[in-house]
Amino acid sequence: MAKARILIVEDEILVARELEARLRAMGFSVEGIASTAEEGIQMVEEFHPDLVLMDIVLRGSEDGIVVANKIRAGQGTPSVYVTAYCDDSTLERAKESDPYGYIIKPFAESELRATLEMALRKRQTDIQLKKAHDELAELARELRIKNAELEEELNLAHQMQIAMLPARFPNVPQGVPSWESALEFTSIYTPSGKISGDFFDVVRVSKDAVGVFICDVMGHNVSAALVTAMVRALVEEFSTRGEANDPGKLITQVNKVLSKIFEQNCAGVFATAFYLIADVSDSTIRYSNAAHPSPLYLSPSSGEATPIQSDPSGPALGLFKDAVYPSHEHSMAAGDSVMFFTDGIFEMEGPDEEQYSQERLVETVRKRIQLPTPQLFSEVIKDVRQFAEGRKMLDDICLVGMEVRRCG
């Protein structure tokens, strides 16, 4: 084991030589003797000792306490004071410089040995702590860089998700200007974080019909966002084929593909979905449901807001690859509307952890059913937030409204 290296700063040469002899006899390596402040600082810079044995009273304008502070600030080398002075003022100044020890002359060899060994142990501990601190600081720096990169990627993912949502909605019948469209759409999309597991799309099915697809993928992480992208691609693909006019067939095909993917790589992942086709030529709504909350059919003339689906729904997407999803029908009339939503709107919790609930949602909508859809949606979200009393939104919120201006 290497000997501990000590520098002596002492202006009395005889005292310094005696200290040197004692230290060598104890097994320490004496790097040198400095008699002035300038020599002490210079020799610390040159030899880098483990410890400085510092006399407080030195010749010149600066005493040992000042020198010790300079050495500690410059090289980080600690000092042990050796002095004949023990008055309160000197002790107070010495304490403020945070020394590793304080020995009053004359002293016993055992006292010197114990003080130096304790100081060197503290020095070693401080070195280890500094190393650990530096390593943690480096890890923290790397983590900040990684977090910044992740934040940038999440921002990009968020922008891409927003870009996947409809920028404009199809006019019905095809070719008419927006103000003459038989159907008018409204949407609110509020992710609980940067990225979302909620998704919706409105696709043209025929000249007089459009399909409205809404889904909610388990989770709010990157994998959920990737699944929504897959679902969007599948809906677009199947909506241009024979499944376009049959919601049950489209949901069934989407489920088969997702089940195969999830079975291989994403066990336990699933998504709920609802697909509805509105055909203004025959005033008919056809739909299929994969464990998604049923949209509400709003009839302002009667003041009723009721779930479109009363029959049991099919299982969530991705769980059973052989599941078959039936299609159902519902009539629609001019002046009515359909409100699609994900479960984030009614699973918001209040102060007693009670959920807002679907029943409360239906009642809230019913009380405001005469409002235009954009205002209705704003009032619903306002009521949900008041119920939550400022609590953070834990799930994504997606609302889609389809107003029937005319049909038949």
Image (cartoon, helix red, strand yellow):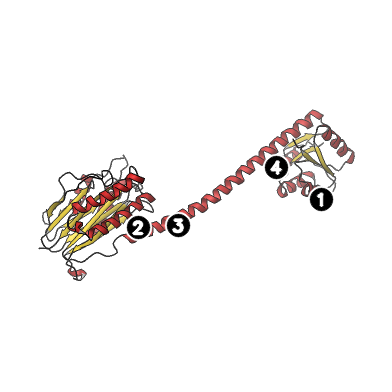
Q: Amino acid at mark 2?
A: Gln
> x, y (%) of residue 364?
21, 50
| Disc 1, SS | helix
Residue under numbered circle 2: 161
Residue under numbered circle 4: 96
Give the mark, 4 or 2, whose residue is nearer the N terminus. Answer: 4
Give the mark, 3 or 2, whose residue is nearer the N terminus. Answer: 3
Q: Which mark is residue 152?
A: 3
Does residue 263 appear anywhere in the picture?
A: yes
State whether residue 387 is above or below residue 333: above
Tell me if mark 4 has few (under 14), some (14-19) or many (20+) residues whose alpha carbon lies within 10 angstroms of its own.
few
Q: Nearer the viewer, mark 3 or mark 1?
A: 3
Q: CA distance from mark 2 to mark 1?
A: 67 Å
State whether residue 240 is above or below residue 391: below
Q: CA distance from mark 3 to mark 2?
A: 14 Å
> x, y (%) of residue 159?
38, 60
Q: Amino acid at mark 4?
A: Glu
Q: Which mark is residue 38?
A: 1
Q: CA distance from mark 4 to mark 2?
A: 59 Å
Q: Nearer the viewer, mark 4 or mark 3?
A: 3
Q: Amino acid at mark 3?
A: Glu
Give the mark, 2 or 1, whose residue is nearer the N terminus. Answer: 1
Q: Amino acid at mark 1?
A: Glu
Tell me if mark 2 has few (under 14), some (14-19) or many (20+) residues whose alpha carbon lies within 10 angstroms of its own.
many
